[in-house]
Every structure is written in structure tokens, then in C-alpha cells.
Amino acid sequence: MHTSAHILNEQFIDNAWVPSLSKTRRPVYDPYRETRIAELTCGDPADVDAAVAAARRAMPGWRATPETCRGEYLEAIASGLEIRRRILAELSSHNNGKPLAEAYQDLDDAIACYRYYAEAAVILGQRQGTVEDADQPNMEARRYWDSIGVVGLITPWNFPLVSSAWKLAPALAAGCTVVFKPSEVTPLPEQVLAEIVMEAGLPPGVFNLLQGDGEGIGAPMSHHPGIDKLSFTGSNAVGEAVMRAAAQGVRPVSLELGGKSPILITEDADIELARDLVMAGICYNAGQMCSATSRLLVHERLADKLYAAIDAAMSELRLGDPLATETDMGPLVSALQQSRVQHYLALAKEEGLHSETPTLALPEHGFFVAPLLYREVPTTSRLWQEEIFGPVLCARRVANDAEAIALANDSNFGLAATVVAGNPDRAESIGRHLEVGNVWCNSEQVAPPQGSWGGMKRSGIGRELGDSGLDAYLELKRITRPLKA
Ligand code: NAD
């Protein structure tokens, strides 16, 4: 794997590693051992210029490459990930702090996503030229889909290789050339994509990887007139900045932003299922999920019993080395993220919030925060309203479904929700009233590649995965002409 002895000071442009023009570097950490594991270039606007130029040169050829052929390249990328599955899962766990089992799940999701869009590319080819109703005598109309052009893809640190697969796979399938920037916090797993792309034989300039931070690479990408579309996953503050930048030149954006997702439990729910889904919704990836179900709305008849079950489950979690098989929860990704979450815990103290969760002993090192349940949190509390991005759960008891739905929808965000009810029909009918992009009824959070992912309200614009994920990189064109004489 190319990591230049863990000094990542080069950019992958035009299928070659070229020195970054930046003179500054930033450290990359192992969040469990709190040790520096690499040094990363901060990146430079001139790096972006070079990558965009390469992507523009490659664009006409890639756009004209038959869809079936693009599908074959995507299949080769999936295989490239598959043969490196173990090493990449370990690297991801090492760099992000997530338990190894979760990192394997990420890898499998990413591989499935490239495979799904390999097939989707073939289907796209078959759809080209679909005959439509011309609605005029002696005329005919056909429908075609063209790639949007050069796309800029920017991802965060919480699901390395997955967030990027959700963008890269459909973009390449659609015939777009790509300038991709992974998070500067977890740059290591995605570094390998360059090697895989070369092995797969993608033409130079189709895939360009820029390492660096928001200032060195992210902002210059957002402002670059040579990028035709931006697809961003990350925080709301940066998402808004990307959108503002994209207004220059009227360039489209897809945004996958934050969440404050609810989990609703009715009085007839199975309490063990409810507990397990609550736990998974707030402790998976140490709560660092945009779709974390961080607001619990439980029927008053079940509330005390469920709170006690959650406290007990939280106190039994094994926090530790993410690479050790017995570990249930790893550290947060960085000292910065740990301090952000600790800030909310201090705020909870100031606000006098009530928790009965037994305090877990933390490992001697690592950016850990112990999971915590706050009971009967006022809706005016910042902990109720804001995305915490850590294992901190806020709960309220409700009298009926109508109250639960009203409180669930009383949020600026609208990414996802879980409903646990006595039967799936009841759960689904509650789900129909929720202002979110995904509802899981009596189910864990699943996001298969043929599904859809994205939010309403301030959780973003557009959908990833499935057909909508491909459409995000396509322009629809209608051609109308006389019938042959
Ligand atoms: P972040 O917004 O700080 O960073 C995300 C990416 O944007 C990084 O690659 C970063 O370098 C880059 N960036 C920073 N400043 C930039 C700028 N001015 N212009 C362009 N790019 C810039 O987010 P984060 O801390 O890495 O991730 C956590 C956030 O991501 C949370 O708010 C979470 O909800 C969100 N998220 C959302 C989803 C989703 O699907 N909706 C998925 C994962 C994470």
C-alpha cells in the first residue's frame, strides 16, 4: 500500500503520485493509542487545479466509454477492495477507532455498493434511447442520460470507504470523472483506492484523490469553476459553505448533513427488541453516525422499564481496543470530537439533566466517552435539539402516538427514524407521519445499495444509493425528431 512511510505528502492525479504543493502537514492519529500514525499534507489550491485539469481532460473519453465497460471497471474496484478486505478493515479500525467487526461491515457495504453500480451502469446503457410519447404526428422522442461532467466529492471520517463508495460508484457509473477528497482525520483507508484504480486499469484522470484539509483542498474544490457538481457529506456548517460556493456558476450540489433522529417506542413494543435497537442506534460507531437515533420517545407505560434496561445494557458495554474481538465500543475518532461531546456533558450538568446510567470505567488511554442516557430531557435543552455525535441519548416519555410523532417532527433535522411497535403495520403507519428520509420499523438500521439515503429539512439535499444515487450524477436529455420518411 502506498503511504510513503506514512508521510502522505503526495496527491494522486492522472494515475500518478505527484508531490503536494503544500508546505504544511498535519498529524493523523490512532484514537485508541493516542499515537501519531501518519503525517498528511494539508493540501494546496494548486493541487486542486492540477486534479481538476486532469479530470477535465479525461472527461470526454470517459463519458463516451460504453456503460458496460464502465461497469466492468466498477466490478474490478469491488474485487480490489475484496482482496484487501482484512487489511483495510484493520486499517479503518486503527485510524477511526471503530470495532473491527464494524469495520468489516463497512468493507462489505462498500464492496456491495461498487457491485450494485457496476450492474446499474449496464442497465443505464440499456435505457439509453428509451422511446417516449412525442405527442405530435409523425414525430418521435427519445430519452438519454448524459454524465454531469467533472464532480467534486468530499467525505467525513465516520464511515471511511463507505461514504466514498456511495459517491464514487454512481459517479463513475454515470460517466463522470472525479476529484475526491476524503477526511483529513481518516485519510489512510481511502489512500488505497488509488492503487486499486490503477490495478483496475481506469484511464488516467478519471479518478483523482486529493488528501488535505478543508482549507487546503475542500474550500478550493467547492469554489473551482472546473467542477460541474459537488457532492458533500459532513457537517451543516460546511455543507452550507459548499452550497454558497456552488452558487457561483449555478453548479448543483448533493448534501448529506447532520441529524437528530428519533426512536419511537409504543406501549405494545417488545422491550428487549426496543432496548437492542436503542443501543445499536446510539452506541454503534460510538454514536458517531449521522443517523444515530439520539432522541428516545417512549410510551409512559414502558418508560421506566426501558430506561432501566438501557442503563443496564450501557453499563455492560466493553470499551477498549477496537482491534480486540471482545470490544463492543471503541474511542471517539479524535481528541477534538471527544471534547465536543464532553462539552455537551458539561452543558447537561449546567442544565441539571438527570441520568442514572452507572459510570463506566474508561480504558487508560484513548478518546473515550462512556455511553449515557438522560431521562426526561426538556425539548428546550441544547442536548435535545443539537447533534452531539457521540454515545449520548436523550429520552422523554409520551402519552400516545400522536405526541410521539409531534415531538419526533419537532426538529430542524429529518434524516432517519426507528419505530418499535407491537406489530409492523402499526410501526409503518407511524412511520408514514415522520418527516425523515428513512424509517426502520422493528428493524436495525440497514442501508442496502438498492435503497435510498438522505434527509429532509436541514439533513440535506438529494438521495444517495439506488436509482436516485445514480440520477445525482446524470443529466436527462430528450431528443425529438421527425419519424423516418
Ligand atoms: P466536516 O463538515 O467538518 O468535514 C467533512 C469534510 O468536509 C471533510 O473532508 C473536511 O475536510 C471537509 N471540509 C472542511 N471544511 C471545508 C470547507 N470549507 N469546504 C469544503 N470542504 C470542507 O464533518 P466531519 O466532522 O468530518 O463529520 C461529521 C459530520 O458529518 C456530522 O455533522 C454528521 O452528521 C455528518 N455526516 C452526515 C452523513 C449523512 O449521510 N447525512 C454521513 C456521515 C456524516
Image (cartoon, rainbow, N blue to C red):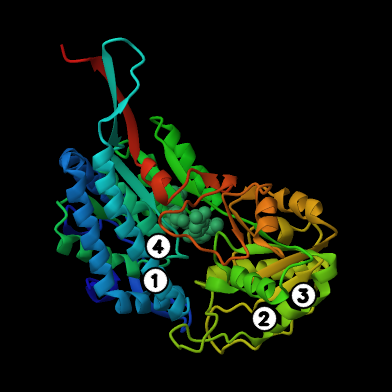
- Three-letter amino acid code at the position of disc 3: Tyr
Mark 3 and mark 4: span between their CA atoms?
33 Å
- Height in image: 46 above or below 60? below
Picture coordinates of residue 37 (x, y %)? 36, 78
- Height in image: 90 above or below 388? below
Q: Which SS class for mark 3?
A: helix
Q: Which mark is residue 162?
A: 4
| Residue 61 in view | yes
Mark 3 and mark 1: span between their CA atoms?
40 Å
Residue at image position (63%, 68%) is 341
Residue at image position (29%, 66%) is 191
Q: Residues within 10 Å of mark 2 (few under 14, many from 20)?
A: many
Between 279 and 5, which is closer to the camera in this rendering? 279
Q: Residues within 10 Å of mark 4 (few under 14, many from 20)?
A: many
Mark 2 and mark 1: span between their CA atoms?
32 Å
- Three-letter amino acid code at the position of disc 1: Pro
Residue at image position (47%, 82%) is 322
Disc 2, disc 1: CB below 8 Å?
no
Q: Which residue is mark 3?
A: 307
User: Is residue 445 toward the left or the right of residue 242 in the image?
Assistant: right
